[in-house]
Amino acid sequence: HWAGGFQVEVNLPVCREMDGWTVKLNFDTEVDSIEVWVGDATKVSSTEYTISNKDFNGVEHQGDTLSFTFMGHGTGDIDPTIAAEITGCVTAAPGETLPPTTPLTLAPSGGGSPTKDFADALGKSILFYDAQRSGKLPPNNPIPWRADSALDDCVVGGWYDAG
């Protein structure tokens, strides 16, 4: 958490087949607002919110885990205790809560590896754009086979595209 805010990862067991879901969140202190990307948040009171699925993610299957992350905002150094449940599912014993300090973990999607080298991907993306440059190229051009090109165009310089 940080001054004025906190982040929580929610992981709730799905108790039945669902074609649409709503999660009820109860906070032990006042929360001004929450931000969630996989659902629509509704403020019921300063200590209660509901989150309902978007059009694209309403189907859940019994035995699966409904997982999402949200950020909350309040006044001062806020670190609330949170109770969460899927409407129609008893997912936590009375008094059992989800601490907002639960670490954010990203699960792999599409069968890939959970670790990605984003620095390498960004570097290759920049090299791609360097290879598409036209006009008078600088001496530090990182693409050895790319030389000056299209120097007689009306507008010299820029990047090549598909046309």
Image (spheres, rainbow, N blue to C red):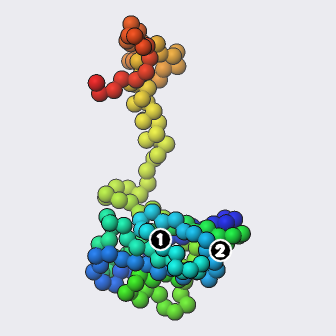
Question: In the image, residue 120 lies at what x, y percent?
Answer: 46, 41
Q: Amino acid at mark 1?
A: Ala
The C terminus: image quadrant: top left
- How far apart marks 1 and 2 lie (CA) works out to 19 Å
Q: Nearer the viewer, residue 149 or 106?
A: 149
Q: Amino acid at mark 2?
A: Asp
Q: Earlier in the sequence, mark 1 or mark 2?
A: 1
Which residue lies at the image location 31% right of the left edge and 57% below the top edge?
110
Report whether residue 103 is seen. no
Question: In the image, residue 29 lies at what x, y percent?
Answer: 64, 80
Q: Quadrant of residue 158?
A: top left
29 to 106, vertically: above or below: below
Helix, strand or loop for disc 1: strand
The residue beneath circle 1 is 41
Q: Nearer the viewer, mark 1 or mark 2?
A: 1
Helix, strand or loop for disc 2: loop
Question: In the image, residue 22 lies at what x, y percent?
Answer: 40, 78
User: Is 121 on the left-hand or right-hand side of 30?
Assistant: left
155 to 94, vertically: above or below: above
Which residue lies at the image location 49% right of the left edge and 42% below the top edge?
119
Q: Which mark is residue 79?
A: 2
Local packing at callout 2 (Cα closer than 10 Å; few below 14, some 14-19, many 20+) is many
User: Is 31 on the left-hand or right-hand side of 15?
Assistant: right
Question: In the image, residue 136 lies at what x, y percent?
Answer: 46, 13
Local packing at callout 1 (Cα closer than 10 Å; few below 14, some 14-19, many 20+) is many
Confirm or deny contact between disc 1 and disc 2 (CB under 8 A).
Answer: no
Q: Residue furthest bottom?
A: 94
